[in-house]
């Protein structure tokens, strides 16, 4: 498990949520979409780290 990767992903998720809300408030669909994309990227990173953890458990 890479804690650094998880921290980075969590920060990106928070950044994405903030950007999505700003996009909603300002009526800027590009900001909203970019925020949602950042959240999706963060989720993928968490999923990859979870898979790595599971593989590591199986190999031990």
Image: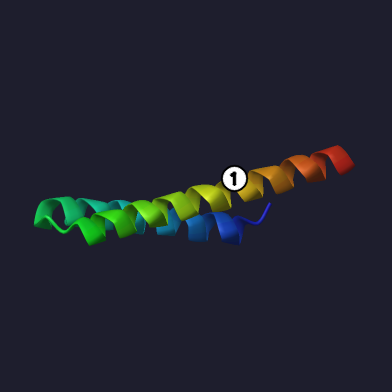
Residue 48 at x, y percent in the picture: 63, 49
Identify the secondary structure beneath mark 1. helix
Colour style of the rendered protein structure: rainbow
- Residue 53 shows in this picture: yes
Asked whether 58 or 23 is in front, the reply is 23
Q: Position of residue 60 (x, y in %)?
A: 89, 42
33 to the left or right of 27: right
Residue located beneath label 1 in the image: 47
**Residue at image x 40%, y 51%?**
39
Q: x%, y% of residue 19?
A: 26, 58
* Above or below: residue 43 compared with residue 5: above
Q: How many marks?
A: 1
In the image as oriented, which residue stretches furthest toward the right?
60
Instruction: Answer with left or right where residue 42 lies relative to residue 5.
Output: left
Reply above or below: 35 against 60: below
Frontmost residue, 18 versus 32? 32
Q: Can residue 60 be seen from the camera position used here? A: no
The residue located at (55%, 54%) in the rendering is 6
Q: Position of residue 7 (x, y in %)?
A: 51, 57
Residue beneath the point at 61% across and 56% down: 3
Does residue 51 appear to the left or right of 44 in the view shown? right
Q: Quadrant of residue 38?
A: bottom left
Front-lying residue, 19 or 60:
19
Picture quadrant where residue 5 is located? bottom right
Using a 10 Å C-alpha cutoff, classify the residue at mark 1 as few (fewer than 14 neighbours), some (14 to 19) or many (20 or more).
few
- Residue at 48 percent of width and 55 percent of height: 41
The one nearer the camera, 30 or 43, is: 30
* Residue furthest left in the image: 26
């Amino acid at each position: 498990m890479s804690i650094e990767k998880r921290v980075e992903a969590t920060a990106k998720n928070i950044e994405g949520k903030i950007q999505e809300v700003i996009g909603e408030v300002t009526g800027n669909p590009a900001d909203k979409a970019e925020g949602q994309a950042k959240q999706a990227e963060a989720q993928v990173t968490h999923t990859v780290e979870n898979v790595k953890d599971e593989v590591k458990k199986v190999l031990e």
